[in-house]
Amino acid sequence: MSLIGEDDKPANTLKESVLNEEERILAYNQINKMMKRLYKEARLVHGDLSEYNILWHQNQCYFIDVTQSVDIGDQLAYQLLQRDCENITDFFNKLRVPGILLPEDLFRTISGVDVEEAEMLLKKDSSVVTYVPSPMTSPVKNVERRKS
Ligand SMILES: Nc1ncnc2c1ncn2[C@@H]1O[C@H](COP(=O)(O)OP(=O)(O)OP(=O)(O)O)[C@@H](O)[C@H]1O
Ligand SMILES: [Mg+2]
């Protein structure tokens, strides 16, 4: 991956950047879409997403530190996605961005599953939860539980 920045100087993280109101809304909407794409297209959850692991460069957000991201079928995926959603929501709430989603609503729009439903699925079966990837249907419909 090439350097995101200018003249060999890396771009600031979102934490370090000073965004005006319009830019804050833009960044929030971009992140929302990027989290969805990561989940639905790459079938990954970042797992350590926060203002410290997002760069802001030329009006565009970039996720970094993606090496610890997990497959959406991973046992920890829902938990990590929940934390990612909370981090992002907290950050933009502190910046007083209007009309942002609650973390649980962000979680649902990304995963297609309610937080409670996800927690129940994990509690109900402590053995492996496997999601059979299928581009035709949502992951919810493809949950298979297997006893270890
Ligand atoms: N400006 C940048 N352009 C391209 N890739 C970057 C840039 N900054 C960071 N990265 C990538 O993201 C990875 C993680 O960077 P980061 O600054 O989060 O370091 P870190 O070691 O994870 O620190 P921390 O534990 O504090 O998050 C780097 O190893 C690099 O691959
Ligand atoms: Mg980092």
Image (tube, rainbow, N blue to C red):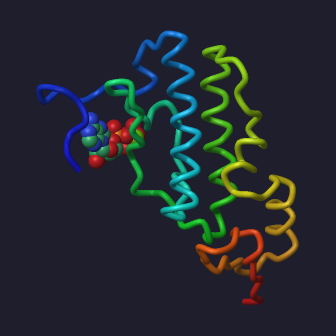
Of residues 91 and 35, the one nearer the viewer is: 35
Q: Residue at x 66, y 31 (%)?
A: 89
Give the left or right position of residue 11, taking residue 70 as reference.
left
Residue 15: image location, x then y, percent: 46, 23
Residue most toward the left? 7
Residue most toward the front? 136
* Ligand 2 rendered quadrant: top left
Q: What is the count of numbered marks?
A: 0
Of residues 30 and 94, the one nearer the viewer is: 30
Of residues 83 and 126, the one nearer the viewer is: 83
Residue 9, located in which quarter of the rendered image? top left
Q: Residue at x 65, y 41 (%)?
A: 85
Of residues 48 and 142, the one nearer the viewer is: 142
Quadrant (top left/top right/bottom left/bottom right) for the C terminus: bottom right
Task: Please tell me whether residue 96 is drawn above or below residue 40 in the rendered image.
Answer: above
Q: Residue at x 78, y 58 (%)?
A: 113
Task: Please tell me whether residue 17 is drawn above or below residue 11 in the rendered image.
Answer: above
Residue 91, located in which quarter of the rendered image? top right
Residue 99: image location, x then y, percent: 73, 23
Residue 6: image location, x then y, percent: 18, 26
Give the left or right position of residue 23, taking residue 108 as reference.
left
Task: Please tell me whether residue 128 is drawn above or below residue 99 in the rendered image.
Answer: below
Residue 64: image location, x then y, percent: 38, 44
Q: Residue at x 79, y 61 (%)?
A: 118
